[in-house]
Image (cartoon, rainbow, N blue to C red):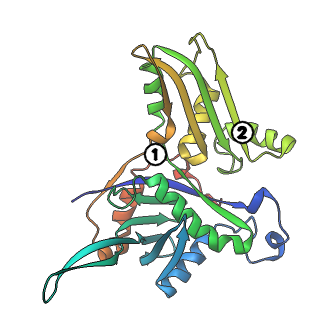
Amino acid sequence: MSILANPFRYFIVPTNDQMHIGHTIGTYGLSNKHEIVIDFLNELEEKNKVEVDYRNNEYLLYLISSNSDRFYLLKLAKKKLIDLHIAGDEDVEDMRTPDYPYVYVLIDTKYQLALIEYKSTVFSNTLGTSRILSAILSNFSREHHFDITLNPMLINDHFWKAIRSSEKIIEAEFALESPNLFDGVIDIEKHLKDIKDKYNNVKSVFKLCNESGSLRLEDTNEELNSTLDYIGNGGGQWKLKVIEGGKPETKESSDHVQKILFEDIIEDEMISDSEKIESYIDQVEDVMKNEEIGN
């Protein structure tokens, strides 16, 4: 049976977006911060699991297997209490017992990708799952004055499908995370860096409005396409307010996360088969595939 997963990119950024003395004299600086996740996962392999409370729920993260400091197969489990009905001597007895349903997470440290299994019986969506994973990773990275965030990889063409299916476009909003995520590979990053240098902002939000619904967004616009590339590779979000079918609609990038299919996981065999894992990674639309990143 095939497993459906959504790809996310993780970013390692200074806590509170400020340089800390630990970044220059500590174990991890800006040049080797990518090693934080590798070291966390290797420690997890020795400890077998970590537990975390997140928003009044208990979660467990297990490392199942790894391959050459690049691929790591994890299980993220959520504690639930279920009611069992046990046959007693004189009557059926009710008993509440913990259950730990889980999803798989495949991490590729080379491209800083996390493929998170979608299983609605455990988590309603992978965006929520990514926040839990981010909290677990950040518990470790904050000791070294870094935060780890995860953002979904999007299907950029769906933005243009949303535009083409709309009768009128009233508003387009683009929220872009801090620059320097992609080592300057995406053109819009230079503009974001100029803005950050001037204002020290951690996010840039651009909003284009035309209340008459005649906002003009064209797929030949290089700056807009660069913005969508930045967002699509995990650098932000977009939102549209449109008229469709005579009614106002809101369309958001979170509804257009890429989908990856891979075979039913045989844990020991899968992680040792680098060629098979790379075939899953190759399904991800990613501008960074030809770049070495360290963010």
Residue 259's spot in the image, x, y percent?
Answer: 38, 48
Q: Residues within 10 Å of mark 2 (few under 14, many from 20)?
A: some
Q: Which residue is depicted at the point 57% across and 63% down?
A: 134
Q: Identify the secondary structure beneath mark 2.
A: strand
* Foreground of the two, 159 or 54: 54
**Image-based side of 70 in relation to 207, left or right:** left
Q: Position of residue 1 (x, y in %)?
A: 21, 60
Q: Is residue 277 above or below residue 226?
A: below
Q: Which residue is mark 2?
A: 204
The foreground one among 284 and 273 is 284
Estimate the spatial distance between the alpha carbons at disc 2 and disc 1, rounded to whole Å: 24 Å
Observer able to see residue 35: no
Q: Picture quarter containing residue 39?
A: bottom right
Outermost bottom residue: 89
State the SS at label 1.
loop
As shown in the figure, which amino acid type bears the numbered disc 2?
A: Ser
In the rendered structure, find residue 117 and report the number of the disc placed on it. none
* Residue 279 seen anywhere in this rendered image of the structure: yes
Residue at position x 16%, y 86% in the image: 88
Quarter of the image for residue 103 reads bottom left
Q: Quadrant of residue 87?
A: bottom left
| Residue 240 against residue 210 in the figure, above or below | below
Looking at the rendered structure, the kind of residue marked 1 is Glu
Q: Which mark is residue 285?
A: 1
In the figure, is residue 285 to the left or right of 94? right
> Disc 2 or disc 1, which is closer to the eye?
2
Q: Earlier in the sequence, mark 2 or mark 1?
A: 2
